[in-house]
Image: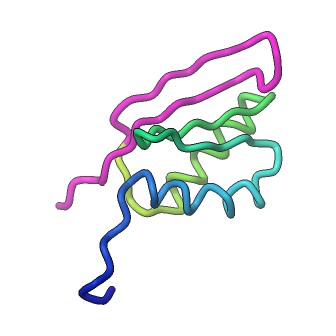
Amino acid sequence: MTSTEMPLSVTEELRSRAGTFVNSHQDVWVTVEDDGELVMAADSPAVLMQAVADWLKEGPDYAVAAATWTTARTQPVYTLRLVLRAAPTA
């Protein structure tokens, strides 16, 4: 990073990953809200949970500060909203 580059905010960093992430997880809908909340949705709970695990595993290292699971009668049926924060350093 040069001295004129600013580090990405959590929201910007998550949004930059979302586009490429859905290319490898085509059954998952992904968006990042303005407040940095990561929203993933799918029609299968197993597909959704695997996608969330993949997202967290692929980094960067974030801690889940809050999670909200919802279901709907319309597609996508399952939605998981995550509030992510930079993981504490050891």
Whether the magenta-drawn stretch holds residue 84 is answered as yes
Residue located 50% across and 55% down the image: 14
Give percent across and percent down for residue 78: 70, 24
Which residue is outermost to the left? 90
Which residue is outermost to the bottom? 2
Q: Quadrant of the N terminus?
A: bottom left
Residue located 52% across and 57% down the image: 57
In the shown orientation, is residue 67 left or right of residue 58? left
Which residue is outermost to the top? 73
Q: How many marks?
A: 0
Pick whichever, 62 or 5, lies toward us: 5
Please say if 72 is above or below 56: above
In the shown orientation, is residue 37 left or right of residue 16? left
Pick whichever, 1 or 59, lies toward us: 1
Please say if 2 is above or below 18: below
Q: Quadrant of the C terminus?
A: bottom left
Tell me, what colour scheme is on the image? rainbow
In the shown orientation, is residue 76 left or right of residue 67? right
Give percent across and percent down for residue 42: 75, 33
Residue located 29% across and 53% down the image: 87
Whether the magenta-drawn stretch holds residue 61 is answered as no
